[in-house]
Image (cartoon, rainbow, N blue to C red):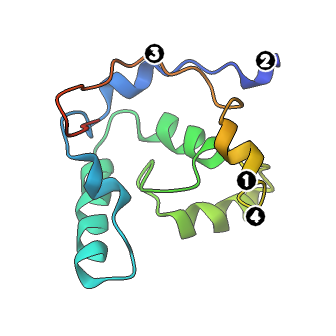
Amino acid sequence: MPQELIHEMDWIEKGSCRGQESVNFFADNMSARGRMEQKLAISVCQNCPVIGECRDYALRYERFGIWGGMTEIQRTKERKRLNIETELDRFNLHTFLKRNNRPENTVKRNLSGTHKF
């Protein structure tokens, strides 16, 4: 893995989203309920101590969901504005499925059935 892709994710343990239902952060923005869930997720992000780290990570690696207080559409616009190339090309299914360009996330997964951040 190239050096610039090595990215520590210890910050994720300090996120305000820890313990929150992940479904709120990946809600369908096509429905009224989904937009309401997105707003709830964004409100969790607003006072997060690691919002900057989360946003930086998401601009480079995350296509879907609320990350760093930003929606998918907001991140797409910000990537264009800042001329950021992502490591996840939405039109390259092979890259999307492999997901091997993402930094290592050593956060332990919740194995109880419902995933929480």
Tell me how far mark 4 sits from mark 1, CA to CA. 21 Å
Q: Nearer the viewer, mark 1 or mark 2?
A: 1
Residue 5 position, x and y percent, is 73, 25
**Label whose residue precedes the other's in the sequence (2 or 4):** 2
What is the number of the mark on residue 9?
none
Q: Quadrant of the N terminus?
A: top right
Kindly identify which residue carries mark 4.
Answer: 80
Kindly identify which residue carries mark 1.
Answer: 93
Residue 9 position, x and y percent, is 50, 22
Kindly identify which residue carries mark 2.
Answer: 1
Q: Nearer the viewer, mark 4 or mark 1?
A: 1
Picture layout, residue 44 above or below residue 32: above
Tell me how far mark 1 sits from mark 2, CA to CA. 20 Å
What is the number of the mark on residue 106?
3
Query: Considering the numbered disc 4 on the image, is that residue within a helix, a strand or a loop?
Result: helix
User: Is mark 2 in CB contact (under 8 Å) with mark 4?
Assistant: no
